[in-house]
Image (tube, rainbow, N blue to C red):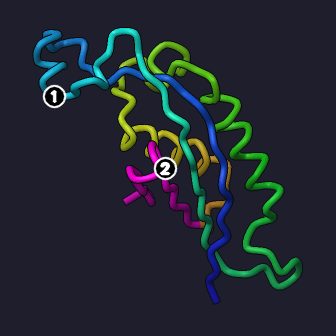
Amino acid sequence: MRVTVSRKAHFNSAHRLYRKDWSFEKNNEIFGKCNNPNYHGHNYELIASVTGAIDQETGFVIDVKILKDIIKAEVEDAFDHKNLNLDVPEFKDLNPTAENIAVVIYNKIKAKLKSNLELEVTLYETPRNFVSYSGK
C-alpha cells in the first residue's frame, strides 16, 4: 500500500527573469515586466508530497515533523525574503523561473529523504500560476 503525505509551506522572494547573454530588448520581449532590472516579488506557496509505503512499526510514510523540518531548512530558510538572483547560489547562473525554482526545491528536499520515498513538489507563483515537478 502506497500513500502520499503532503506539507504546505510558503516563502516570499524577489527575482528577475533574464539571460545575461541577451540584450535588454530581447529579455524584455521574452520576459516582459518580469525582466524589471529592479526585480519583483512573489508570495510563493509550496506543496511537497512524499509517497511511499506505510511503515508497519510507526504507521507513517514519513513523520510530518521531519518533512516540516526539511522544508524549513532547505526552502524557507534558504529562499524566504531573499533575492533569488543575488542571494541564492543555485540561481547564480540559472534563470529563477517557476519551473527552475521547482526543480531546485525538488533536488534540495529529495536529497534529505530516504531513497525509497518518491517526491513531487508543486510551486504556486501566484494563485493561478503553478508548476509541478516529480523528478521525471
Task: Decide whether residue 120 is among the magenta residues.
Answer: yes
Numbered disc 1: secondary structure: helix
Would you say 36 lies left or right of 108 here? left
Task: Tell me whether the residue at label 1 lies in contact with that at label 2, contact meaning CB atoms closer than 8 angstroms.
Answer: no
Image quadrant where residue 102 sits: top left
The correct choice, above or below, for 47 with respect to 41 in the image is below
Mark 1 closeness class: few <14, some 14–19, many ≥20 residues within 10 Å: few
Q: Which residues are magenta?
A: 118-136
Distance between mark 1 and mark 2 Cα atoms: 22 Å
Q: Which mark is residue 122?
A: none
The correct choice, above or below, for 5 with respect to 97 in the image is below
Mark 1 — residue? Answer: 30
Task: Decide whether residue 83 is among the magenta residues.
Answer: no
Q: Tell me the amino acid under the disc marked 2.
A: Leu
Q: Residue at x 62, y 61 (%)?
A: 115
Give coordinates of residue 106: x percent, y percent. Answer: 52, 48
Q: Quadrant of the N terminus?
A: bottom right
The correct choice, above or below, for 71 with respect to 49 in the image is above
Mark 2 — residue? Answer: 123
Give coordinates of residue 57: x percent, y percent. Answer: 88, 81
Image quadrant where residue 103 sits: top left
Closer to the camera, 76 or 56? Answer: 76
Give coordinates of residue 80: x percent, y percent. Answer: 64, 29
Would you say 57 lies left or right of 101 here? right
Q: Tell me the amino acid under the disc marked 1.
A: Ile
The mark that comes first in sequence, 1 or 2, is 1
Mark 2 closeness class: few <14, some 14–19, many ≥20 residues within 10 Å: many
